Image (cartoon, coloured by chain):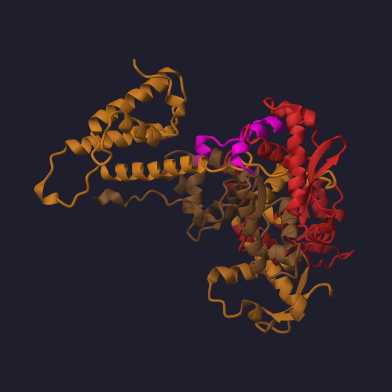
Chain colours: A orange, B brown, C red
Amino acid sequence: MGYEIKLDIFEGPLDLLLYLIKKNEIDIYNIPIAIITEQYLEYIDVMKSLNLDVAGEYLVMAATLIHIKSKMLLPVHDDTEDEEDPREALARQLLEYQAFKEAALNLDTRDILGRDVFKREYDHEDEVDNERILDEMSVFELVEAFRTIIASIKSDEFIEIDIERMSLSDKINEIMERLTIEKVVTFSELLGPLNDKIQIIYTFLALLELVKLRLIEAYQSEPFGTIRIFLAVKQ
Amino acid sequence: MDNLKAIIEGIVFLSETPISVKKLREIIVDAEEQEILKVLHQLKQEYDERQSGLYVAEVAGGYQLRTRDTLGPWIKKFRGIKPVTLSQAAMETLAVVAYRQPIMKAEIEKIRGVDVSGTLKGLLEKNLVRVVGRKDVPGRPIIYGTTKKFLEVFNLRDLSELPTLRELKELGD
Amino acid sequence: MDNLKAIIEGIVFLSETPISVKKLREIIVDAEEQEILKVLHQLKQEYDERQSGLYVAEVAGGYQLRTRDTLGPWIKKFRGIKPVTLSQAAMETLAVVAYRQPIMKAEIEKIRGVDVSGTLKGLLEKNLVRVVGRKDVPGRPIIYGTTKKFLEVFNLRDLSELPTLRELKELGD
């Protein structure tokens, strides 16, 4: 077969399709789907015969191509003029991918720092422990740091952190901040003009959590009376 | 100030990251921002005119002295290290993030047609891409964007300096 | 070589320690030592003549680009406004506080396995962590949480925007 070992250089099914389109000198707006499908499947077979791991995405694309091919075989009815050419979505996807592929090549031709142009390096000997500049850090590094710690201890005592838990922390911070300033707040003041059900639930859960943590105290002078909230310990 | 140019040259030389006019102004309080900017451009021009091995790069909202690209081969020999390069896959993912930010992982994958977990993580670790926040849709997926370091590394003043993406509208023709 | 001067300037600029003529010769094999020395002195003279903020220092048997001592006061000021930095230890403590808040010092120490007094103090000073309140139990332990500045620095609208561990794992290892 006339295929060189070019398979691993494809960045995915779209890349392979673009290659076939170029090789066959085909108009991207008018892809002869039968030919392309055949060649595409041959490539997949070659990959498999070479025991290359054919990623699922390649197989999904194969199915898409076969689907388009079968649609093209159906007789066209005159009254379905508006119906989109089944190849159009694929052509659009290929064009978009091609534009980004070009953009990537374009980025690569820039004067890249550390490859084409250079700045002075600084020895940070005086700075112990690999200090990092604060405004250059991303939240990703924070999560990574946390993950490193978690990984080093028995993980079963840790519950998964989820968005809800963090929303609760937000609420807790908000309530504590308010109590530090105002000293006493009523329950209805805390809820304020909230009409967001989720916010009301979070406020209530945060209060329960704070009472449990013994960070706040709540008093009510009579049933259904005003609930007043204080800091458990004056600061 | 007669030695304003020398002071600015010295600070731009020492600064580890591109230094902004605003920051320079904080150090040289006697000069106006306008004046500082003028001197920076004068310096830039002078470095160019005398065909120095260095140039004043205008990147990521600041200024920095760098070696010219023509010196690349000698610098590589001097440093004795192979520069880290990005794979094509990483480059494509980076391009999609740069042009479409803020963007979700699923959207990048739709454009590239492949799973991008690995390349995205690599870009996060290299600090070229960052977590921008979450999208206000069910599931609140994480959205990504490029960093200041991306601008620094790719020699961009800001994102608007990116060349326009080839138009896709030709499809309708 | 027509750009010999530019190459030497670039290397002298990048060199962290004074670079010797011999070492330069090893990089630029096409030039004679004599020639390199001549260019170095030419460069030195040129930097002096145009009253640049930089000069070619001849020290410890080598050459290096440095800022002139007349810039001293400004350089000091520049170094003084050094950006705030975080050590890895501080980063880890911050991560624990962020994800486990509201949290006591003893709990942070249990998770990190080390004494965190120092890093916690640093984080409080940098206004990334704050005292949320005190627990009404014997000893009245202090409870810590993150600040608004923490959200600002990490570009988060609120804490729920922090990526979860599960989301990070999805990016692959």
Quarter of the image with the C terminus of chain C in it: top right
Asked which quadrant contains residue A17, the reply is top left
Tell which residue pokes out farthest to the top in this image. A1
Where is residue A121 drawn, in percent x and y?
Answer: 73, 43
| A88 on left or right of C40 | left
Give the mark count: 0
Does residue B14 lie above or below A151 as drawn? below
Where is residue B161 drawn, in percent x and y?
Answer: 50, 54
**Camera-side residue of C36 and C165:** C36
Quarter of the image with the N terminus of chain C in it: top right
Residue at the spot x=28%, y=31% of the render? A25
**Camera-side residue of C12 and A95:** C12
Queried whether the magenta region covers residue A65, the answer comes back as no
| B12 on left or right of B117 | right
Which residues make up the magenta segment? B67-91
Where is residue B155 drawn, in percent x and y?
Answer: 57, 48
Please say whether residue C92 is visible from this viewpoint. Answer: no
Residue at the spot x=48%, y=59% of the render? B137
Queried whether the magenta region covers residue B88, the answer comes back as yes
Tell which residue pokes out farthest to the left in this image. A78
Does residue A180 lie above or below C65 as drawn? below
Does residue B55 lie above or below B90 as drawn? below
Type of secondary structure dominating the magenta stretch: helix
Does residue A108 lie above or below C110 as drawn? above
Where is residue A135 drawn, in percent x and y?
Answer: 69, 56
Please say whether residue B114 is visible from this viewpoint. Answer: yes
| B118 on left or right of A74 | right
**Camera-side residue of A126 and A57:** A126
